[in-house]
Amino acid sequence: MDIDPSTTKYLISARLSTDGIVEKPDIVGAIFGQTEGLLGDELDLRDLQKSGRIGRIEVEVSSSKGKSEGLVYVPSSLDQVETAILASALETIDRVGPCKARINIEKIEDVRVSKRNKIIERAKVLLNELMKTSKTTGGDLTDSVRQSFQMEEVVHFGKERLPAGPNIQDSDAIIVVEGRSDVINLLKYGIKNTIAVEGTNVPQTIIDLAREKVVTAFVDGDRGGELIVRELLQVAEIDFIARAPAAQEVEELTQKQIVKCLRNKVPADQFAEMFNMNAPLPRNGEKQGRMDEMRGDRGDRGRRDGRDDERRGRDQRRHEAPAPLPPPQPPAPKLSPDQSRYKGVLEDLNNTSKAKLLNEGGLVLKEVHVSKLADTLKEGSEGVKAVVLDGIITQRVLDLAVEKNITSVVGVKLGNIAKLPTSVEILTKDDLS
């Protein structure tokens, strides 16, 4: 639809429907014919159009099953009152040609406001581009070039195409981090032997690398980081654990913080004992030799001991010696009565994608779909003390729990949480197993 911007101040938009098939000339003729003399000489449509105070009437119409529907646009340079009177007059039209018709005004748009809004939005885009361009000058130029180079250094490694530093293949020791942003931040400070797991499900590429290389897991200082460590210890031969300071992420650490965290890394078996996790997988002999060499022991002895371990293993298998019994697992921590109740509710919800809201006595107040949980808590959660959901615990649910004085949130997994509340007990399926 073409509108003359030099004469139009307002645009009347109306929807038309008829009980028969009509065309554009029929509609325009009905508008002029049925409003003639209705509003007096001052608002006669023909005179207004001749003087340029009303623009060309545009019609978009289509027919189907013996009926017609369409839109009518009337540009106006009259004042607001006159434009509103003219618009209401259009609704009096009840026939188009031989057919019954109905016209409803949808809106009267101030074209100048729309133009101003477009100007503002375009100005924002232009200003943003200008500011981005300005940042590349002076002292920021060096940082921009460095950042661009670091982005180019990120490679995709393994069949899962995991983000990694360029030295991941050649280094005897590697650092496993959570995501691509962590890899980029470490590259920024010259650490190029990193690779990201990209989630809590550990890729096979990481498992294969961990069999051959000395691996340090470097994770965020939050609940999500702890979950990734638990998963890594169960499926891969992790040797050391390093963590960011509490509530901080690896991707936001400074060079000094990164160096300090890596310097304070803890052996995986010691870390597992400290946090009551499953014991790490045993290392093969060759890998143990490389670890001894890295720790300052004689490299030859480490590699020789590794080969001896492998040879003794082959001799044992040759003589069909019985496999050694696995080390005893520490007893599972005892659950409180409330936690046992939550565990039962979570098991009942398995594969339902639903959530239950419990009161202080453990009774179910309401059951909703997980997708409607946040809205339900926001609308009304009087008497709710615990939420158990067959899904991932999100930041939004935790924020609402704090706001509504809910003391416990239980779910299958913990999502990417930026801020862990201290007033809410957070439990996952792993915590209750």
Image: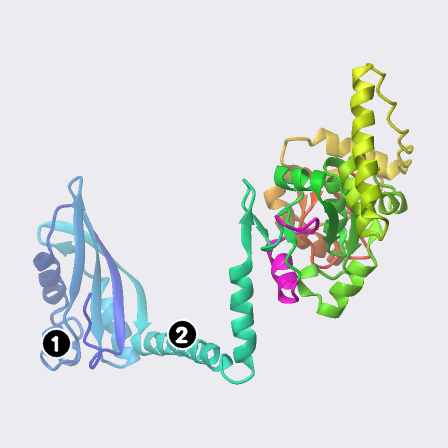
Q: Is residue 312 visible?
A: yes
Left or right placement of residue 374 versus residue 48 in this view = right
Query: Which residue is located at x 59 percent, y 52 percent?
Result: 164
Left or right placement of residue 342 versus residue 139 in this view = right
| Residue 183 painted magenta | yes
Query: Which residue is located at x 13 percent, y 58 percent?
Result: 27
- Image spot of residue 418 (x, y percent): 69, 58
The local secondary structure at tag 2 comes to: helix
Quarter of the image holding residue 58?
bottom left
Left or right placement of residue 394 versus residue 64 in this view = right
Q: How crowded is mark 2: few (under 14 residues within 10 Å), some or many (20 or more)?
A: few
Residue range in magenta is: 169-190
Q: How far apart are marks 1 and 2 (CA)?
A: 33 Å
Residue bearing the label numbered 1: 49
- Image spot of residue 275 (x, y percent): 87, 46
Q: What residue type is labelled 2?
A: Glu
Vertical comparison of 192 with 87: above or below: above
Vertical comparison of 260 with 412: above or below: below
Residue closest to the eye, 303 or 421:
303
Vertical comparison of 41 with 174: above or below: below
Q: Which marked residue is nearer to the observer: mark 1 or mark 2?
A: 2
Q: Which mark is residue 121?
A: 2
The local secondary structure at tag 1 comes to: helix
Q: Which amino acid does label 1 sit on?
A: Gln
Query: Which residue is located at x 74 percent, y 64 percent?
Result: 258
Q: Is residue 366 visible?
A: no
Q: How many labels does the image show?
A: 2
- The answer to whether the residues at label 1 and label 2 have Cβ atoms under 8 Å apart is no
- Image spot of residue 136 (x, y percent): 49, 79
- Image spot of residue 214 (x, y percent): 74, 46
| Residue 409 painted magenta | no
